[in-house]
Amino acid sequence: MTTFASLEGKVALVTGGSRGIGRAIALELGRAGADVVVGYRTGRDEAEAVAGEIGGRAVEADVSDPESARALVDASGELDVLVNNAGLTRDGVLARMSDDDWRTVIDTNLSSVFYTCRAAARTMMRKRAGTIVNVSSIVGIHGNWGQTNYAASKAGIIGFTKSLARELGSRNVRANVVAPGYVTTQLTDALPEAATDAMLAATPLGRLGDPADVAGAVRFLCSDEAAFVTGAVLLVDGGLGM
């Protein structure tokens, strides 16, 4: 029986795959039949547990470092799918934001995407096949108070991916963006109740997202069912970004 959005026989790398959205993506791609490499910087036990659940591999790397990112891609083998999910926040108002908080967020969230895509693109172009999904955020589209660094990094992912899609399209390599809204993770769990209530009030579906909601969208974009989709920004936000 044919399975919708099957990734049988594909090799996939998911960065930031040890927890949260990245964990859900890795598990979903594994369930779709992909041989998944779970990239992680911290959380070795969690990453190995994810990999073990789907028969994949966990590989430690700091994707904000170009050499480490390249080594991760090389260790993953002949990649068919690259999902860039690694990211962090260092929130604060601009007037008091330190240089380190700016650089850390830009390097981890945005520069890492450049490093891994550059390393993976060569093989994909040679094979004339491959798909890249970069995880942005609704904050990269609409901005958010106290997150100039995070918003810049996530907006940068969108512009980067659209340009990449133009460059790689003639080689049958696709590049797309998934932009989650507010999703239940360790980050949102720490928010004040008033902030969560405001998010819910602005979301037409009236709930926070689940990491699995994002994972399903990523799986679709990685599959042959999305073979004519490139340069797209898919909002997975319950209608928040309308």
Image: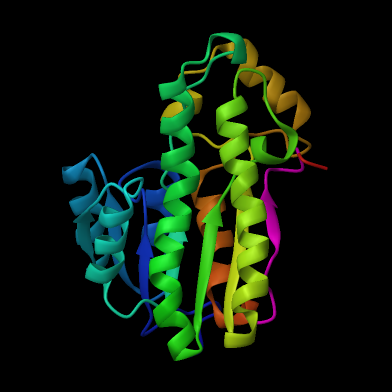
> Can residue 91 be seen here?
yes
Instruction: Residue at 53%, 57% (x, y): give it.
Output: 134
Q: How many marks?
A: 0
In the image, residue 216 lies at what x, y percent? 54, 60
In the image, residue 107 lies at what x, y percent? 43, 40
Instruction: Residue at 22%, 44% (x, y): give it.
Output: 46
Q: Could you say which quadrant of the image residue 203 lies in?
A: top right
In the image, residue 45 lies at what x, y percent? 16, 44
Instruction: Residue at 36%, 65% (x, y): give it.
Output: 13
Task: Identify the magenta region.
Answer: 227-240
226 and 98: which one is in front? 98
61 and 55: which one is in front? 61
Is residue 125 on the magenta stretch? no
Task: Give the main secondary structure of the magenta stretch.
Answer: loop
Q: Could you say which quadrant of the image residue 101 lies in?
A: top left
In the picture, measured across the screen, residue 53 lies left or right of residue 151, that is: left
In the picture, measured across the screen, residue 21 lies left or right of residue 66, that is: right
- Position of residue 74 relative to residue 135, above or below, is below
- Position of residue 100 relative to residue 172, above or below, is above
Find the residue positioned furthest to the right. Answer: 242
> Can residue 28 be seen here?
no
In the image, residue 6 lies at what x, y percent? 48, 79
In the picture, measured across the screen, residue 58 lies left or right of residue 184, that is: left
